[in-house]
Image: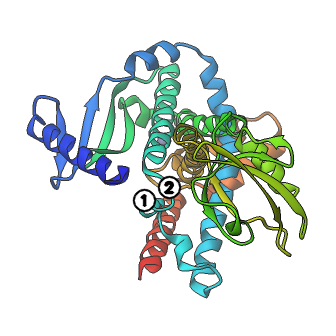
């Protein structure tokens, strides 16, 4: 049985157990398949890290940055939906990421990456809120059949009554934390490519198929030992058309050497994969990189209940507080365009576009 089915079955078993004891663990269920589990998990960390006032400054500074990113995202989904309607973008492009799981995104790395992204995001909201003196009531997990769908922190009522600026700073914390993880993942990803690993051939095409087989392990190319994905990629970049390459492979513990001439297009025709653990690590880092990037940008869309709503709502006020009269004026004008009323219209627009694109893509 493949791992994705195994995980699904395990998740359902876990769900049935959780469902049976739902009253004693304070699990609220909806429609029998969704659940909200309120926990005290992570609250100690939030309490400890939230003591520092530096988060307040970072939160305020990040508001304009987040507004710009959110604007780019809004612009993107609008142009994407127009392209989708006009047919210049394939329907596939609008399929939500959830449907790509198991097919494009491998299950285990995908779920780990999503968990990292969501936990960091919510933890950051909690820490920033605490730094502004706002109580964090609980942390929780949203479950779908035992699979964690998302996480949240439940803030005290002080949040609703807080200044726009403070709400904006707390809201920007989540996406900001995701962007940070995204930036950390970039060098980690290139590092993971240099890790020593066995490189197995998983597919062969012309011209290599005449000599090499699936399951062969790449040992040496043109006298250079191939120890990592990086080594192989370095070689792949230098392949020229119609040139002879000496490739040594391990087959049944025997070292075999072949001279292979590349195709007219400069191709050798081998597809390789690192060993299981390395592949898992690389995939996890790769999807951590993507999920954090996407989660940050998606949440910055100016729509209720996303973080972008509070971030955008705070922006004009932030400008109005400046000393420079010109900036104050811009803030006043901006407030006519961006306020709670216009943002609720934008909210409708955003969700219509998103839902519309998904429905259209499946039609
Ligand atoms: Zn958030």
80 vs 88: above or below: above
Q: Quadrant of the N terminus?
A: bottom left
Q: Is residue 36 left or right of residue 212?
A: left
Q: Is residue 265 left or right of residue 57?
A: right
Front residue (pair 322, 47): 47
Mark 1 and mark 2 in contact (Cβ < 8 Å)? no
Above or below, 239 relative to 219: below
Residue at position x 83%, y 46% in the image: 326
Task: Tell me how many marks there are.
Answer: 2
Q: Label 2 vs label 1: CA separation?
A: 9 Å
User: Where does residue 251 sit, x and y in percent of width and height?
Assistant: 61, 49
Place of residue 203 in the rendered image (x, y in percent of width and height, measured from the top left): 60, 63
Which residue is located at x 45 percent, y 75 percent? 356
To which residue does mark 1 refer? 98
On the image, the x and y values in percent for residue 254 come to 64, 44
Label 1's element?
helix
Instruction: Name the foreground residue: 316 vs 230.
Output: 230
Report which residue position mark 2 lands on: 105
Residue at horizontal 50 percent and vertical 33 percent from the top: 120
Query: Which residue is located at x 65 percent, y 35 percent?
Result: 180
Q: Is residue 206 above or below residue 248?
A: below
Instruction: Determine which of the numbered discs, if any, sits on residue 33 in the image.
Output: none
Q: Please determine whether, in this image, residue 291 is positioned above or below residue 168.
A: below
**Is label 2 within 8 A of ligand 1 (CB to nearest ligand atom)?**
no
């Amino acid at each position: 049985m493949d791992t994705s089915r195994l995980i699904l079955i395990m998740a359902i078993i876990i769900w049935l157990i959780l469902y049976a004891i739902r009253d004693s663990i304070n699990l609220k269920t909806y429609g029998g398949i969704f659940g909200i589990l309120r926990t005290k998990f992570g609250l100690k960390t939030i309490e400890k890290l939230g003591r520092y006032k530096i988060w307040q400054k970072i939160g305020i500074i990040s508001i304009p940055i987040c507004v710009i990113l959110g604007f780019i995202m809004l612009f993107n989904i609008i142009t994407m939906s127009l392209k989708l309607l006009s047919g210049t973008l394939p329907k596939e492009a609008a399929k939500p990421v959830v449907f790509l799981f198991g097919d494009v995104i491998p299950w285990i790395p995908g779920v780990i990456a999503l968990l990292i992204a969501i936990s960091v995001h919510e933890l950051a909201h909690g820490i920033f809120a605490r730094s502004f003196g706002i109580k964090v009531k609980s942390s929780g997990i949203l479950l779908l059949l035992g699979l964690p769908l998302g996480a949240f922190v439940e803030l005290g009522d002080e949040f609703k009554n807080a200044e726009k600026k403070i709400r904006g700073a707390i809201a920007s914390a989540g996406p900001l934390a995701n962007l940070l993880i995204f930036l950390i993942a970039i060098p980690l990803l290139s590092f993971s490519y240099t890790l020593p690993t066995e490189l197995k051939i998983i597919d062969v095409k012309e011209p290599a198929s005449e000599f090499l087989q699936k399951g062969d392990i790449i040992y040496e190319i043109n006298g250079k030992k191939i120890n990592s994905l990086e080594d192989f990629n370095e070689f792949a970049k230098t392949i020229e058309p119609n040139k002879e390459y000496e490739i040594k492979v391990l087959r049944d513990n025997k070292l075999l050497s072949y001279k292979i001439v590349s195709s007219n297009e400069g191709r050798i025709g081998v597809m390789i994969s690192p060993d299981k653990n390395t592949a898992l690590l690389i995939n996890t880092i790769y999807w951590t990189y993507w999920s954090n990037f996407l989660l940050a940008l998606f949440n910055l869309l100016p729509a209720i209940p996303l973080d972008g709503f509070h971030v955008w709502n705070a922006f004009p006020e932030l400008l109005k507080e400046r000393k420079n009269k010109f900036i104050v004026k811009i803030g006043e004008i901006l407030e006519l365009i961006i306020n709670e009323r216009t943002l609720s219209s934008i909210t409708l627009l955003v969700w219509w576009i998103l839902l519309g694109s998904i429905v259209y893509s499946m039609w």
